[in-house]
Amino acid sequence: MNSESKAVWGWALYDWANSAFATTVIAGFFPVFFKHYWSHGADPNLSTAQLGFGNACAGLVMALLAPLLGAVADRASARKRFLIVFAYLGALSTAGLYLVGQGNWALAIFTFAMGNIGFSGANVFYDALLTRVARPERIDAVSSLGYALGYLGGGLLFAFNVLTTLMPQAFGLPDAAAAVRLSFVSVALWWGGFTLFTIFWVPEHRGSTASPAPLAALAEGFARLRSTLQKIRQFKPALIFLLAYWFYIDGVDTIIRMAVDYGLALGFPSSDLITALLIVQFVGFPAALGFGRLGQRWGTRRVIFMAIGVYMGVTVWGALMTHRMEFYVMAVAIGLVQGGIQALSRSYYARLIPPEQAAEFFGFYNMLGKFASIIGPALMGAVGLLVRRALMPAAPSAEELIRVGQMASRWSIASLLVLFAIGALLLYFADPKAGRTPDSQG
């Protein structure tokens, strides 16, 4: 394996490493375990509020810090070093969840928030390294390789951890709670272990000047942050794309976060929903690779439009579905485009920014990713509340409560069409030349 291939695989394997946190912890076990173990005996509405507050705090911290960290890392030529610091902060925090006792919800929230900060912070520098390991004509394929390995790696470990919770005695564990706690340790070992490939295989491209002292780098980071704000306002192609990305990725992230809750609201069994989550992971692996090839052949921008169209169709279908088998089919459809739209959005943006300031610009890209989970859930909540109030009888029966609740959920998921439509419209005005490769005209 030559040095270029080694750098590409070392970079892509970090997605294999950290996706274990996204699947097993964020999407899989933490929300359920928090409610039933760390918040044992507490009011369910209170535990939901506590979990939401913890997520919001971690997201806000990283949304505010991401551009500054990117600017500092660019100046100090320390993208890989910053990635390592945040990655192992996340891995160690995840392992720490094993030690949190039953009922200790506050410590669980704090430890989970630190893991989220490590996960999100490392992604700023991971994304920024893309322009260092991939040649321009291969940037779509390399970005897609990372997402594909992330879906496969995260899905494999999640499947194993689900198996241990279903059959804990077969693995020498006393009960499902012990299996879930041990799954957090498995994520930490997986994350920290596979990050070693990134450490040893991805080179750090240093600048011509020596790295400044930490305080000097921080001061210069603030200065460059102000400069970047001015550049983004003046750099029209990147600005228009960031606005488009903000809207359509908000729809994508909202579906990721709310799909299980939506399925539960329609009365589907939780076991079916976990199975659907696994389907998304394993379909997402080959699909992300396929999208990288499509981006090279048809043009990145054109394929992103196609993915947005699929999401709009899935949203309409989801609002009308009545049978749990339809949820499985939807999982396949989402798996086909979820990794692709994420990977190609990253590579499209990478073409619009100066490579020497990639960490700085990707700081804003990731900041929008953090704020992207605000509009969609708020829109769904507002629409659901309005529909519920409009349709609820004065003295509803139990059957009417269920019917109106499901109708409100259907309208709330349908409201996400607005986000995809605005995102597609803004993307139409983005620079079409950025989506072209030497072999495409899109």
Image: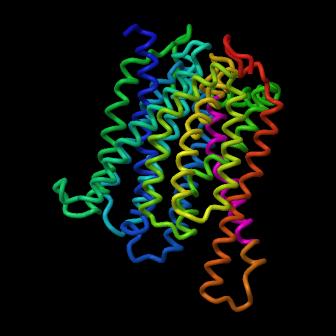
Query: Which residue is located at x 79 percent, y 44 percent?
Result: 422
Query: Which residue is located at x 67 percent, y 60 percent?
Result: 319
Name the image quarter holding residue 340: top right
In the rendered image, residue 311, in percent from the top left (x then y), is placed at: 66, 45
In the rendered image, residue 409, in percent from the top left (x then y), is placed at: 65, 67
Name the image quarter holding residue 236: top right
User: Could one spot residue 388 in this view of the protein?
Assistant: yes
Question: Which of these two is toward me, 54 or 3?
Answer: 3
Question: Which of these two is toward me, 256 or 22?
Answer: 256
In the rendered image, residue 316, in percent from the top left (x then y), is placed at: 70, 55
Question: Which of these two is toward me, 218 or 130?
Answer: 130
Query: Which residue is located at x 69 percent, y 35 percent?
Result: 306
Q: Is residue 367 found inside the magenta-colored segment of the image? A: yes
Can you say whether 45 is above or below 167 in the image?
A: below
Please state the extent of the stretch shown in magenta in the rendering. 362-386
Report the magenta stretch's main SS: helix
Quadrant that contains the C terminus: top right
Name the image quarter holding residue 425: top right
Can you say whether 279 is above or below 215 in the image?
A: below
Query: Which residue is located at x 56 percent, y 61 percent?
Result: 53
